[in-house]
Amino acid sequence: MERQPRARHRRLRALAAGTGVLLLSAVLAFAQPASAQDDGTELVPPGVEPDIPSLQDVLADDFRIGAAIDARDIADPSAQLLGKHFNQITAENHMKPDAIQPTEGDFTFDAADELVDYAEANGMETYGHTILWHSQVPDWWFQYPEGHAEAGEPLGSSDEDRQIMLDRLEAHAGALAEHYGDRIWAWDVVNEVISDNNAEIHRHSRWYEIFEGPEYVSHAFRIAREQFDAVGATDVKLFINDYGTENPGKRDNLYNLVADMIADGVPVDGVGHQTHISLNTSIDHVEQSIEKFAGLGVLQSVTELDVAIGAPGEGEEFPQYEARLIEQGHYYRDLFAMYREHADQLESVTVWGLHDGRSWLRSLTEPRPLESPLPFSDQLRSKWAYWGIVDPGRLPEIPEEEEPDYARVQVPLADTAPEIDGDKDTAWDEASTVATEVNVEGGEDGAKAEVSLLWDETALYALFEVTDPQLDESSANPWEQDSVELFLNPGNAKEGGYGVADGQYRVSFTNVVSLGGNGPDAGEITSAAATTSTGYRVEIAIALAGEHAEVGAEHGLELQVNDGTDGVRTAVHSWYDPTGQSWSTNANWGIAELVEEVEDGNGNGNGDGKLPTTGAGLTIAIASAAVLAAAGVTALMLVRRRAAANWGE
């Protein structure tokens, strides 16, 4: 199947004449697979469309198509949707460690059994999720057991403590093997063991701390293989599963771990790509990960697919909702065209939720009732995403996007490089200064910063003066600590995802550095931090390659301040990107232009710099598109503009 290219900058078309209110009202039911009424109440699902093609039939020659479910999804009308379109299930939560063994030695299979029984009764396969994880694990896993002199206290890292963990893992895997045997064809043996900080490589979870390294991962696979083989379930496949495998740096870290395990004879059968992505994620990066792991000869599955449309928080307007759904249809078209090209390398593709109303993204950090990442709507109806998979010819053209007026800042050449020591020396006197005024998450009154910017032939320099009366680093997650972040896309390619030279750099108020999904060619960071009477100061230098350190060069740039309070992140403010997705894509960042001297009025980062909003014309235009699509005409005549400021995460 030939994959159709996605245009990044699309032609501007004129809005069709003669569109009016009558046309709008006539097509709303067709055009808008809405998740809620205007008053926010949930709509009653009208039931499954019986006459549309089945996803499992369309993909029958390619791979199994699955959905993550719980007991709500095996009762009508949801069960009708599940049975019509899917031939594999994953238990969304009922097979995780805290669900299976809430207290040591007390195994509870009832909820999981209900799903497995249903799958078998309806000719579906079951994919097991998950045996070992750092999250949704009872506290007792990491504490000394009853009868021990330190019962209830946290385990250390002695050989005795590690053996306690291995014994527990053997008992847990053994119980799963004995109970299910080969009724479940594959298991995520370990889940999310690669760090989001590419320089850190391995997630520093309690598992990692107790074993003082990643050796527990190999132990888990050997134990799982022994336990399943012991009950005759020798064909059960053992997977390692993680998100962010579309990020080149994280992908390479996972690849190296799997390659090392295979070389050491560890019985790892497959790799699961979670694939929680957005409309800005590069499909090429998703494909490159599949191709890379294919070289190891392992099985592969897409285990938790969803494609976020960037909906705002509850109560915020989202006039481009329908336009995003059409764009999502084209994204699913291209994504599944790529998957089908690699069908011989994929065992299954599972979407993380039966329909939009069941998506975890609706309440990830705050309610987002219009986030709609899946092929079916709250009403169990087909969306453009579904038609992108099944019959792309029915898709209207993507709503045209006028290039946003990205915020710009001219960054002057430093006469003398600032010393990175936490003090503000005179080198900063000639810097450009911008402010992090865009509220991305949490309270408007959260921590903010004024950020000074300079460059020279070796580096880009930033000095954050953060106003924050209460400093906190009690969270184990660095992004929930009081910290600043600088995102850099050398060359301002804005290709989506992270390129090979892109970087996310985080520095806490105590100068603890952590990195995000940095590409292999991302510049090195030097930093210093100091507390001040009004908060704290962070100085940063990011190394620039020669071709990126010259007058006239433009770079994608984003600046962010995280406000931590009592171990949780209570606010996020940025310079320009309002989406909360800077960690995953460079598409929405502002622009830094390197200059010798700043022109008057161009050193404050304005350039209007706000993503323009839309009015009623967008809804009318979408309605027009729906009527044209119904009539077999696929030209969509409008401009899609993205909303300003308060999108949230």
Image (spheres, helix red, strand yellow):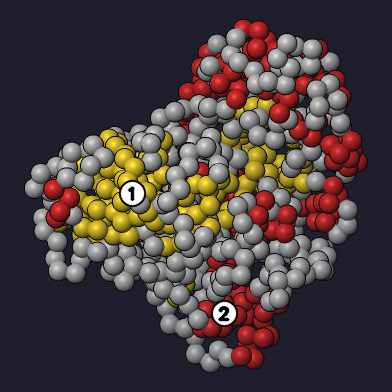
- Would residue 303 appear left or right of 255 to someone viewing this image? right
- Would residue 226 appear left or right of 517 to someone viewing this image? right
From the image, tell me which residue sits under label 2: 619
Which of labels 1 and 2 is toward the front?
1
Quarter residue 189 falls in? top right
Residue drawn at point x = 64 percent, y = 59 percent: 367
Measure how far apart labels 1 and 2 are at the Cα level: 50 Å
Residue extending farthest to the front is 533
- Would residue 275 appear left or right of 590 to someone viewing this image? right
Q: Earlier in the sequence, mark 1 or mark 2?
A: 1
Residue 92: give x, y in percent of width and height.
Answer: 74, 42
Check disc 2 and report its element: helix, strand or loop.
helix
The numbered disc on residue 73 is none
Rendered position, 535 above or below 514: below
Q: Residues within 10 Å of mark 2 (few under 14, many from 20)?
A: many
Residue extending farthest to the top is 159
- Would residue 282 appear left or right of 223 to someone viewing this image? left
The numbered disc on residue 533 is 1
Rendered position, 114 above or below 358: above
Residue 191: give x, y in percent of width and height.
Answer: 63, 31
Mark 2: amino acid: Thr
